[in-house]
């Protein structure tokens, strides 16, 4: 039994869950356990089956999401695992603007004949998603989406999918369990790229799946645990330990980064170098009302569309000192990226869209750097 109380607030769970028992001379923190094999006679047996450092990380994430967590080698290993649950010839529905790697896996599986179809849909259009649900085996939701920041009506969609008998997975990478708890809203499985906010320091790659505390969720947990043992998409122990350390400050990082993002989004919306700001925290954003209903905050990713097209957007990413031009997101440091620099990025993502991952630096320093660069972009067009 975990020695924490699930009724505690998430901030306290982030700090206290997944600790060794408070016995004399026990370490306060779960140490890194490096082991490929354990002395026979117990339950752990082998390093592909079990590891105490994984368990500590999984206890914290499970407590935060309200379910049972399993860690994976990466977010995409978690995606591949979920897709492996779909029967041969099955159908998977996914957001047209889902994470690019998720869409890549779906495309490959359809091409190989492993799935019979993987229709993509605007996840903010509840009717359109529900129309595709009959006949689907698995529905993947992502909200807010990466990088378009569309917000899905999770309650309506989870209810519709479960009524149809399909499994519903929510990629909760952008929101984190502090801002959105999909298992409470009706999801069967929550998926994370723990690489991002959960770990939070841009120094590791890790994924996770969390199953609901329902009979079906328990069944899925058993399936997933056996699958991980057989397939071996297991996390590195040191990476998991670093992510566990990251989880201890998740609430502080998310709170500060989201406060910075809210302030920057407001200022960006008034800057003449910007055509459009996508951020669910702005009252003018199409996802604002829905996000206000189902989230406890709006997160720390902003997508902007820079006036002057891809060239102006590229100029922006080259002209800052604090903001680092880099892919990925969710670290303590502010980074940004023109997404269409990737040949594989979907054509419906505007080619002047820059996805910004707002960090926990001082907001005035971030704004000074950004607004100077944006003024430079404007001046270059004069
Ligand atoms: C990064 C990301 C993934 C993939 O995770 P990796 O850890 O990079 O494998 C999946 N979903 C979302 C929303 C992401 O941002």
Image: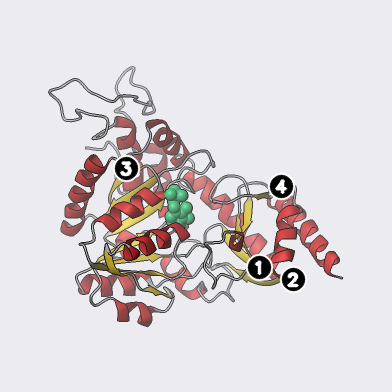
Picture residue at 53% right of the left edge, 63% below the top: 345
Is residue 374 rendered to the left or right of residue 263?
right
Quarter holding the N terminus is top left
The residue carrying mark 4 is: 322
Q: Which element is circle 3 on?
A: loop
Pick the residue in front: 154 or 223: 223
Q: Quadrant of residue 155?
A: bottom left
Q: Residues within 10 Å of mark 1 (few under 14, many from 20)?
A: many
Work out whether mark 3 precedes mark 2 in sequence or the reverse, and give the earlier one: 3
- Rendered position, 316 above or below 244: below
The residue carrying mark 2 is: 308
Q: Locate residue 153, reporting x and y percent.
A: 39, 73
Q: Are marks 1 and 2 in contact (CB under 8 Å)?
A: yes
**Measured Cα–Cα span from mark 3 to mark 1:** 36 Å
Picture residue at 44% right of the left edge, 41% below the top: 247
The residue carrying mark 3 is: 233
**Measured Cα–Cα span from mark 4 to mark 1:** 21 Å
């Amino acid at each position: 039994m975990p020695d924490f109380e699930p009724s505690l607030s998430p901030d306290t769970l982030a700090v206290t869950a997944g600790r060794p028992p408070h016995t004399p001379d026990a370490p306060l923190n779960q140490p890194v356990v490096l082991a490929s094999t354990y002395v026979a006679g117990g339950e752990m047996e082998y390093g592909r089956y079990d590891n105490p450092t994984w368990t500590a990380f999984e206890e914290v994430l499970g407590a935060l999401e309200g379910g049972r967590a399993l860690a994976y080698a990466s977010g995409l290993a978690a995606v591949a695992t979920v897709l492996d649950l779909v029967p041969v010839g099955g159908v998977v529905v996914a957001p047209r603007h889902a994470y690019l790697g998720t869409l890549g896996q779906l495309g490959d599986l359809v091409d190989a004949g492993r799935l019979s179809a993987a229709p993509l849909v605007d996840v903010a259009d509840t009717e359109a998603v529900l129309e595709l649900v009959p006949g689907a085996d698995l529905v993947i939701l992502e909200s807010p989406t990466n990088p378009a920041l569309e917000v899905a009506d999770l309650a309506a969609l989870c209810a519709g999918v479960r009524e149809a008998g399909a499994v519903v997975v929510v990629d909760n990478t952008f929101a984190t369990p502090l801002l959105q708890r999909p298992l409470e809203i009706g999801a069967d499985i929550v998926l994370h790229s723990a690489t991002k906010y959960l770990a939070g320091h841009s120094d590791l790659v890790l994924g996770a799946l969390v199953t609901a505390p329902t009979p079906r969720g328990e069944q899925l947990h058993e399936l997933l645990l056996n699958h991980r043992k057989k397939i071996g998409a297991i996390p590195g122990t040191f990476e998991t330990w670093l992510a566990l350390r990251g989880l201890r400050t998740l609430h502080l990082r998310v709170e500060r980064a989201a406060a910075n993002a809210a302030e920057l989004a407001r200022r960006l919306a008034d800057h003449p170098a910007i055509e459009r700001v996508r951020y669910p925290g702005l009252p003018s954003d199409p996802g604002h009302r829905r996000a206000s209903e189902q989230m406890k905050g709006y997160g720390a990713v902003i997508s902007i569309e820079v006036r002057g097209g891809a060239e102006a957007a590229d100029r922006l990413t080259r002209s800052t000192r604090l903001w680092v031009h880099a892919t990925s997101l969710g670290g303590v440091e502010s980074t940004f990226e023109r997404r269409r620099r990737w040949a594989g990025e979907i054509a419906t993502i505007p080619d002047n869209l820059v996805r910004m991952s707002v960090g926990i630096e001082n907001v005035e320093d971030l704004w000074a750097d950004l607004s100077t660069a944006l003024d430079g972009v404007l001046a270059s067009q004069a």
